[in-house]
Image: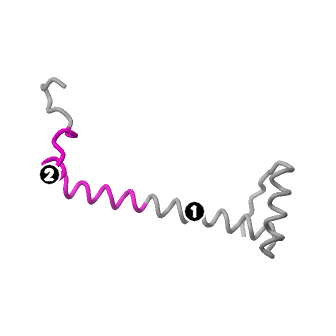
Amino acid sequence: MPALNVEFSERELEDLRQIAKERGTSMKALVREAAAADIARHRALREGAEAFRHFFAAHAEEFAEAFPEDEPPACGEAS
């Protein structure tokens, strides 16, 4: 399995040791779990943003009618 060396300050290492001890796990497992959670959160945000873009595009005319003051000026119109 590929590996990654990560540098931490002494304070960060001590905090990681304490958290791992409190959770009854290894530092390696703790860091892997944190990274996996961040990856999952990033994917969810990306997928949510994509779903919103599709929804907004599909309903652009409805949004324009409901919020005309938020529409950009047409070409040639003064702002």
Q: Secondary structure at mark 2?
A: helix
Q: Is residue 25 left or right of residue 70?
A: right
Task: Please name the residue shown 31% across and 55% down the image.
Answer: 53
Q: Position of residue 2 (x, y in %)?
A: 72, 65
Q: Which residue is mark 1?
A: 39
Prevailing secondary structure class for the magenta stretch in the rendered image: helix
Q: Nearer the viewer, residue 14 or 51?
A: 14
Say which quarter of the image contains residue 40: bottom right
Q: Nearer the viewer, residue 57 or 20?
A: 20
Location of the C terminus by quadrant is top left
- How many labels, in total? 2
Task: Please name the residue shown 79% across and 65% down the image.
Answer: 19
Examine the rendered structure and indicate whether residue 41 appears above or below residue 57.
below
Outermost residue to the bottom: 24
Q: Which residue is mark 2?
A: 61
Q: Is residue 9 left or right of residue 37?
A: right
Kind of residue indicated by mark 1: Ile
**Where does the magenta region start and end?**
47-71
Examine the rendered structure and indicate whether residue 8 appears above or below residue 72.
below
Which numbered marker is on residue 62?
A: none
Kind of residue indicated by mark 2: Glu
Residue 63 inside the magenta-drawn segment: yes
Query: Which mark's residue is nearer the viewer, 1 or 2?
Result: 2
Location of the N terminus by quadrant is bottom right
